[in-house]
Image (spheres, grey):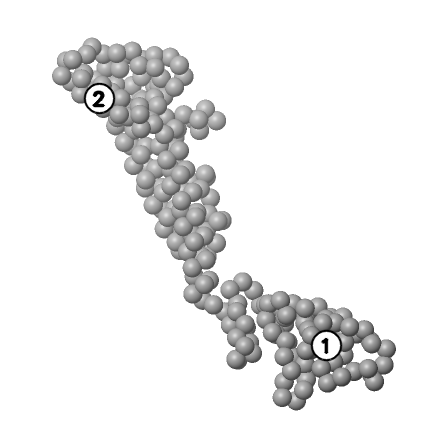
Amino acid sequence: MKVFLFNSKTFFEINKKEEMTDDTFIISDKEEYEIEQSLEQGEVWVDDTHNLRWSGVKAGDFYKWDSKRKKWIFDQIEADAALQARRDSVWNNVKEYREKKNNGGVLEPISDKWFDTDQTSQTAYDLYGKALAKGQVEPQEWKTMDNTTVTLTQEILDSLQGAIYGVIKKNFDMAEKLREQIYQSQEPETISIENADWGKCYLSARG
């Protein structure tokens, strides 16, 4: 028969009850599994009536064994911290995706061409716009995202920068909506980021 030796916390097989000692308890296969889990996660003890007791399998994540009260206690503080970390992780993914969209190009409506929108390109538009306004340069041929060129007049430049602002603002607003959803959700990973209503960029427009 299968027994549990309490003092050594080991399992053993005996043939006769006469082989049992005070710290020997007869157990079933199911009880063996439960005791093994209890030894790993909780506690096994002998009560005042000399009966073998065990905590059983942990009820779930964020449960801790209270040896004084002999029960599993849900740790709300740890659970809240873990949920906050999950939400923060999803929010970081949103910010990264927003940045990707912001840098993904924008359609300028007058020329009907897609222009780069990364930070270097935006700085170039600003510097070029200042020089153009002061008459320091003539309108230049500007390479677009499909490798064709457009004469970047002041009118087209103004339209382009307006389009860039529009996309950045749309992406900011979309990210804020997702942020609100994320920090209200118990399952933030289920919130779809890519399927949200982001501003169109060059790659998404091309399909």
Name the spot of residue 112 as percent of width and height, x first.
34, 19
Find residue 100 and report its horizontal and vertical position in percent: 40, 33
Name which residue lies at 36% across and 21% down.
114
The residue singled out by tag 1 in the image is 5
- Which residue extends farthest bottom? 49
What amino acid is at disc 2? Leu
Q: CA distance from mark 2 to mark 1?
A: 81 Å
In the shown orientation, is residue 110 left or right of residue 6? left
**Picture quadrant where residue 168 is located:** top left
The amino acid type found where label 1 is placed reads: Leu
Q: Nearer the viewer, residue 186 or 68?
A: 68
**Farthest residue toward the left?**
134
Q: Earlier in the sequence, mark 2 or mark 1?
A: 1
- The residue drawn where x is 56% and y is 64% is 60
3 or 149, nearer to the observer: 3
Where residue 205 appears, x then y in whole percent? Answer: 43, 26
Residue bearing mark 2: 127
| Horizontal and vertical percent position of residue 120 | 31, 25
